[in-house]
Image (spheres, helix red, strand yellow):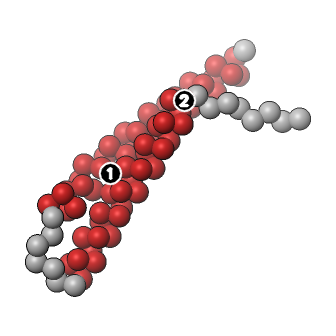
Amino acid sequence: MAQTPKRSQLETTLAYMTVAVILSSILAILTTLVLALFEVEQIAPIIVQLPLVGLPIGFILFMALLVVTVVRKSRENRG
């Protein structure tokens, strides 16, 4: 039988954080586009600036998740 590898709590947390940050940034982009389509004059600055911060943070979290996963897999293959 094939065993499913156990993920560490760190990997699970990084995965959920990555998805949450990137998804909220994409939703902020879509919200900004829809509000601009309907010519709303007052768009909250946090909605406009969230993707400028969120997408790089999401990328960094994704790279951290990749490093943690590669380290775990290399340890599993060694022993």
Residue 70 is left or right of residue 45, and the answer is right
Q: Earlier in the sequence, mark 1 or mark 2?
A: 2
- Quarter-wise, where is residue 37 in the image? bottom left
Q: Residue furthest right?
A: 1
Kindly state the secondary structure of the residue where label 1 is placed: helix
Q: Residues within 10 Å of mark 1 (few under 14, many from 20)?
A: some
Task: Look at label 1 and name its amino acid.
Answer: Leu
In the image, which disc is placed on residue 69?
none
Q: Residue at x 63, y 23 (%)?
A: 74
| Residue positioned most to the bottom | 38
Q: Is residue 38 above or below residue 8?
A: below
What kind of element bears circle 2? Answer: helix
Q: Is residue 75 above or below residue 35?
A: above
Query: Mark 2 — residue?
Result: 9
* 39 lies above or below 76: below
Which x, y percent locates residue 79?
72, 15
Near mark 2 (Cα within 10 A), the count class, few <14, some 14-19 or many ≥20, is few
Observer-nearest of 60 and 35: 35
Q: Are marks 1 and 2 in contact (CB under 8 Å)?
A: no
Residue at which label 1 appears: 55
Q: Nearer the viewer, residue 7 or 63?
A: 7
Q: Position of residue 29 (x, y in %)?
A: 29, 65
User: Which residue occupies 54% across, 29% down?
Assistant: 9
Q: Position of residue 17 (x, y in %)?
A: 43, 43
| Left/right of residue 64 with respect to residue 2 in the rendered view | left
